[in-house]
Amino acid sequence: MNKNELASFQTRNKILEIARQKFVTKGFHNTSLQEIVEQIGLTRGAFYHHFKNKEEILYELIRIIQEEIGSYVEKRAMNSQDSWEQLIFGCVAFVEKAVDKDTMKILLVDGPSIISWQEWKQMDNENSESHLKEQLLLLQTEGKLKKTNIEYLTSFISGGLNELAIKVSSMNPFDRKEIESTIRMMLEGIKNG
């Protein structure tokens, strides 16, 4: 990476960092592009070298957050060597990370209302849902999962976790044990044996 490429990379990351802070504290609609540009000390022309508009920033932030959640879920799931427990730990970790204020507002509130549902769903499919599907396929291969349509089951669990995260975000304090207990009880119905 040459000097200009490095400077461009750093500016782009600074735009994303400032926008993320603003979107979390004020919301997407209440944050102006001008605020972001001024806080960084850029001209609008310089900004447009990196992003076309505010929506493109949001799209990139959703992609980044999806990747962060995927990494967090994978890390937490690996706290067990048992594939069934990995599923449970991963589901709980998803809810934990999704209700984080830096995540929730952008991923589950503003994201689906700003970018198209198809774009949001595609990003979800490429990240959280793909990890979930892999784990369900592993469980099926190991004989730990009742015979079922994995595509349907993946969508069902993923949608439920998204809704649970939205519900839990309004509750204080976050009760991890209660969430894990609920997830275990629901997933027991698909366990083979």
Image (tube, rainbow, N blue to C red):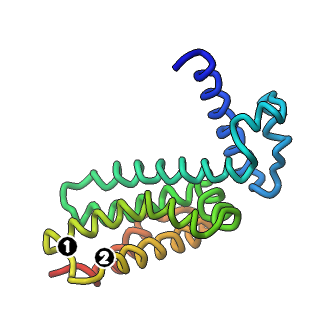
The numbered mark, 2 or 1, whose residue comes first in the sequence reads 1
Q: Tags 2 and 1 in contact by the CB under 8 Å rule?
A: yes
Could you tell whether 43 is left or right of 108 in the image? right
Residue 131: x and y in percent read 35, 60
Mark 1, other Cα within 10 Å: few <14 / some 14–19 / many ≥20: some
Quarter of the figure that contains the C terminus: bottom left
Residue at horizontal 48 percent and vertical 59 percent from the top: 96
Q: Nearer the viewer, residue 159 or 58?
A: 58
Q: Nearer the viewer, residue 122 or 73?
A: 122
The answer to which quarter of the image holds residue 101 is: bottom right
Query: How far is mark 2 from mark 1, CA to CA?
Result: 9 Å
Residue 100: x and y in percent read 56, 55
Q: Nearer the viewer, residue 64 or 77?
A: 64
In the rendered structure, which amino acid carries the disc numbered 2?
Answer: Ile
- Seen in the picture, residue 184 relative to 103 is either above or below; the reply is below
Q: Does dot 2 land on a helix, a strand or a loop?
A: helix
Residue at horizontal 81 percent and vertical 36 percent from the top: 37
Could you tell whether 168 is left or right of 30 in the image? left
Residue at horizontal 75 percent and vertical 55 percent from the top: 28
- Seen in the picture, residue 161 relative to 16 is either above or below; the reply is below
- Seen in the picture, residue 147 relative to 184 is either above or below; the reply is below
Could you tell whether 148 is left or right of 126 in the image? left
Identify the residue under disc 1.
Answer: 140
Identify the residue under disc 2.
Answer: 150
In the rendered structure, which amino acid carries the disc numbered 1?
Answer: Gln
Q: Does dot 1 land on a helix, a strand or a loop?
A: helix
Residue at horizontal 50 percent and vertical 54 percent from the top: 66
Q: Which mark is residue 148?
A: none
Residue 39: x and y in percent read 80, 33
Residue 103: x and y in percent read 58, 54
Mark 2, other Cα within 10 Å: few <14 / some 14–19 / many ≥20: some
